[in-house]
Image: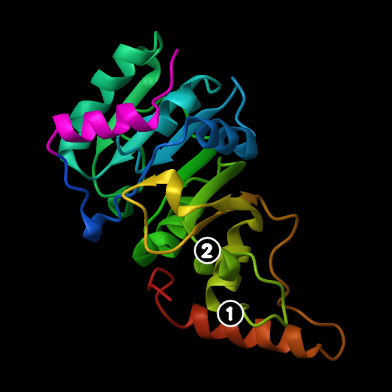
C-alpha cells in the first residue's frame, strides 16, 4: 500500500478539475506522515471498523486501511465519493474493505446495509459544522470507543476546555456529555490543500468515565455552578444547534 503525497494530491485535484468548495470546508490533508500520525493517535487497530467523515481525495482513507479491519467513508461531494474507490484500488490491495457513502454526514442516523458497528471515528471537519457533526455521531453511534477530529484550533480549545477556563462553555459541556475530550496535536496550514485561513488542532476523545456533574451533595463551586447553568440552558434548546 502506498499513501498519497502532496504532488499526487495536487495532480488528482487537477485531473478532476477540482476547485475545493469553501462552503463544504474542503481542505485536503496532503502530508502522508501526518495521516499516519492521526491514525496512531486515534488508536486504530485491525479489530476496528473506522468511520471517516469527509475523506476528500483519500489520503487519510489509505492510512486508515493500513490499520483498520475496514473503513466506512462518508462524503457529501459526489465527485469525490465516486473517485475515492478508484484511488484506493490503485494504491491498495484492500479496496474491498472500503465502503463509501455519498451523503450529508448530518443526515445519517444509521449506516445502510452495514453488518458491523463503527468503533473509531476520524474526521476532518469544517468550522461551521464541526460541533454538530461530532455530537451527532457520538449520540447515534455509541459503539465508538475513540476517535480524532481535525478542527479549527479555536474549536478544539473549546471542546477540550477545563471548567473555569476562558474557553469553557456550551460546546465543552455538550461534548463532555458524550465523551472525554483532550487536545492531541496541531495541524499547520501547510498540511492542507488549499491551506485554511487558520491552523487546526486534533481533538481526541474516549468514552467518559461518568456523566457530567449534575447532582451536588454540597454547595457547588463556581465552575460547577457554571456547568450546571450551561447544561440546563443546553437541555432547554435543540442539542444540535451550532454554538
On the question of residue 113 being in view, the answer is no
Identify the residue shown where x is 39% and y is 72%: 242
**Which residue lies most toward the top here?**
93
Callout in the foreground (1, 2): 2
Horizontal relation, residue 186 to residue 207: left or right: left
**Horizontal side of residue 46 vs 109, given as left or right:** right
Q: Residue furthest right?
A: 218
Viewer can see residue 93: yes
Q: Quadrant of the C terminus?
A: bottom left
190 or 50, nearer to the observer: 190
Front one among 31 and 74: 31
State the residue lying farthest toward the left.
17
Placement of the N terminus among the 4 image quadrants: top left
Q: Is residue 58 above or below residue 206?
A: above
Region rendered in magenta: 1-17
Indicate whether 171 appears above or below 85: below
How many labels sit on residues? 2
Judging from the image, what secondary structure is the residue with disc 1 in? loop
What is the x, y in percent for residue 219?
85, 91
Mark 2 packing: few (<14 Cα in 10 Å), some, or many (20+)? many
- Could you say which quadrant of the image residue 53 lies in? top left
Q: Residues within 10 Å of mark 1 (few under 14, many from 20)?
A: many
Task: Specify the label residue 193 is tagged with.
Answer: none
Q: Which residue is mark 1?
A: 169
Q: Position of residue 209 (x, y in %)?
A: 75, 55
The residue carrying mark 2 is: 153
- Whether pointer 1 and pointer 2 mark residues with C-beta atoms closer than 8 Å, the reply is no
Q: Secondary structure at mark 2?
A: helix
Residue 150 x/y as whole percent: 49, 51
On screen, residue 107 above or below 114 = below
Amino acid at each position: 500500500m502506498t499513501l498519497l503525497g502532496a504532488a499526487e494530491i495536487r495532480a488528482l485535484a487537477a485531473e478532476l478539475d477540482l476547485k475545493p468548495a469553501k462552503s463544504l470546508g474542503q481542505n485536503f490533508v496532503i502530508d502522508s506522515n501526518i495521516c499516519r500520525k492521526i491514525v496512531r493517535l486515534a488508536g486504530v487497530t485491525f479489530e476496528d471498523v473506522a468511520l471517516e467523515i469527509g475523506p476528500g481525495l483519500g489520503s487519510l482513507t489509505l492510512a486508515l486501511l493500513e490499520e483498520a479491519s475496514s473503513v466506512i467513508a462518508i462524503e457529501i461531494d459526489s465527485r469525490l465519493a465516486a473517485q475515492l474507490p478508484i484511488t484506493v484500488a490503485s494504491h491498495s490491495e484492500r479496496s474491498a474493505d472500503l465502503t463509501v457513502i455519498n451523503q450529508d454526514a448530518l443526515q445519517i442516523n444509521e449506516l445502510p446495509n452495514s453488518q458491523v458497528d463503527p468503533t473509531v471515528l476520524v474526521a476532518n471537519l469544517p468550522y461551521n459544522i464541526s460541533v454538530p457533526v461530532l455530537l451527532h455521531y457520538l449520540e447515534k453511534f455509541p459503539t465508538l470507543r475513540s476517535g480524532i477530529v481535525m478542527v479549527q484550533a479555536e474549536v478544539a480549545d473549546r471542546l477540550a476546555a477545563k471548567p473555569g477556563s476562558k474557553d469553557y462553555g456550551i460546546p465543552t459541556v455538550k461534548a463532555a456529555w458524550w465523551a472525554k475530550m483532550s487536545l492531541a496535536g496541531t495541524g499547520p496550514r501547510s498540511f492542507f490543500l488549499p491551506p485554511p485561513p487558520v491552523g487546526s488542532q486534533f481533538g481526541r476523545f474516549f468514552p467518559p468515565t461518568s456523566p457530567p456533574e449534575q447532582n451536588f451533595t454540597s454547595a457547588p463551586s463556581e465552575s460547577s455552578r457554571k456547568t450546571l447553568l450551561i447544561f440546563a440552558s443546553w437541555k432547554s434548546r435543540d442539542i444540535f444547534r451550532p454554538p
